[in-house]
Image (spheres, coloured by chain):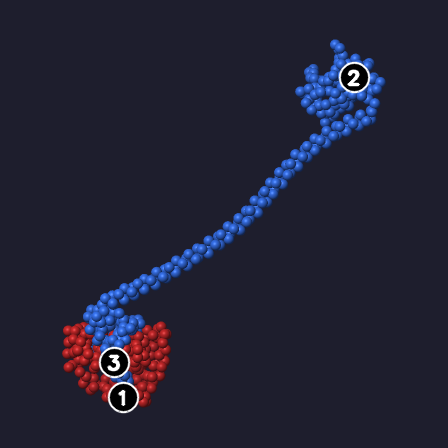
Chain colours: A blue, B red
Amino acid sequence: MNRKGFRDPRFDDLPAYALGALGPEEKAQVEDLLARSEGARRELAAMLETAASLHAAAPQVNPPAKLKAGLFAAIAANRKDALLEFRPAIAGKPLNGRIVTAGTQAQRPATFTPGRSALAASLTALAAAVVLAVFFGMRTAALQNDLDSVNRRMADERAVVDELQVTVSALKGEVASASEKSGEQGDQVSRLAQANEALQAALMDQRWLTYVTFERDWAAASWLRPEPDAPGAQGQIVVSPAGDRAALFVDGMPPLAEGSHYLLWLMGAGWRWEAAAFTVDEQGYARVDISLPGSVAQFTDAVITRESTGEQTDVMRSQVVR
Amino acid sequence: MADLDLLALIGRSDRDALEVLYDRYARRVFSLAVRILNDPVTSEEITQDVFLSVWRRSTSYSVDKGKFTTWLFSIAHNRTIDELRRRRRDRNQNNDDIDDHLDVESQGTSPDDLAVAHSEYAVVRQALSVLPPEQRAVVELAYFKGLTQAEIALKMGQPLGTVKTRMRLALRKLRDALGARINAEAI
């Protein structure tokens, strides 16, 4: 209490401090008071004596004899500084440094073994090794867990890759099938074109056969050969049995430009006769009836020319064989 | 030989002096630990630790800090209470049996207690018995059960100030009752 009658409230905690009934924070506050106040120290000293006497209220029990033997055996083997270093921790920690008697050497902590400093050092090293082993064991276990996790992820990725590979293979098959079908279609188109060409040829032959069949007594007098300007053209001149009528059949003639036409010329010795003028349809086909001026035997050659704006071009030529 | 003389010898690494002190107080230290913890094995460890502290820290003690026995039993009590509180925090051990043990002893009805023919024990037990029940309770809850004053207030349903007052009054009455014996203890 100071001169003005003020009493530090921490004085009220001195009884609890003496009885060990303060928490860490309150205890620190009281110890701060004790460091500053001589009156607090005096008051506490009396309380501590009273509190300490309470130990006598405990029923008296003799400690085992081995406790004393172990204590002094340890002290004999270790100096004070060693005990300082290896003192067992009680407050807040397990009591692992208990000294036992010489008869229970197996339970004795290595640090308290009398005359066995080398053994103690070895055991200490062994303990350190165990700690390190535990540490590295835990570390290894952690790494193993990480590795397992990576392996699982790799397995998952491999499964995805496998699925993709299956899909790609299927797509490749489909592409190959499509390509094959495409090739087949190309072949089909090609075959179709060939068939069409054959059909067109057949049609021309049919026309020709139809004519020949229709005019069964008529005889061919000339087979016209194409010139370079009409490479696909073909023609036939047939003559009636009397020899006074003839017919020209052409096919594959080049289409004509507007204002142009074809002319059939029958050639004799030093002269030529314009037998007929004609045009062709889209397929270059034409049938031209001709009234002959005399016997067909007077003609030696037949020529077809294309006539266009004052220009004349030979397109077919042949001998008359009759 | 007085305790302080023995301490002086211990300060010079005299093992015989420590042995005398051990023979003089080891049973009391051990009994206190057993009384609080109800665990003889851990009580042995605490007893050993207390005397190792005496051996190691004898030079740190001075008369200015109080009697040697006050210092010795303060060390023993503090370490025992620390262990009790650690156990309570960890909840690794149940000390309810200690509570029951306390109640029996506070009433002085234990046949074992009656069989202990020890004057000091009888005197302290007598001093406790004359305390008002509420004052005796706070002392026993604090000293033997290791409860803080705040925990005692909560347990008893009393204001903290009331508990503080009861502690102060109880210690004063105990000192009055034990005064002659306390003063008679060797220093």
The mark found on residue B116 in the picture is 1
Identify the subunit bearing mark 3.
A
Residue A123 percent coordinates (x, y): 27, 66
Q: CA distance from mark 1 to mark 2?
A: 168 Å
Pointer 3 or 2: first along the chain = 3
Identify the subunit bearing mark 2.
A
Q: CA distance from mark 3 to mark 1?
A: 20 Å
Residue A70 percent coordinates (x, y): 24, 76
Secondary element type, mark 1: loop
Identify the subunit bearing mark 1.
B
Residue occupying the point 27% across, 84% down: A60
Residue A138 percent coordinates (x, y): 37, 62
Q: Residues within 10 Å of mark 1 (few under 14, many from 20)?
A: few
Place residue A261 in its image quadrant: top right
Secondary element type, mark 2: loop
Place residue B163 in its image quadrant: bottom left
Foreground label between 3 and 1: 3
Q: As displayed, is residue A266 above or below residue B79?
A: above
Q: Can the viewer see residue A9? A: no
For mark 3, what is the residue?
Answer: A65
The mark found on residue A72 in the picture is none
The mark found on residue A322 in the picture is 2
Residue occupying the point 81% across, 27% down: A213
Asked whether, in this view, residue A292 is left or right of residue B181, the answer is right
Q: CA distance from mark 3 to mark 2?
A: 158 Å
Closest to the observer, B80 or A303 = A303
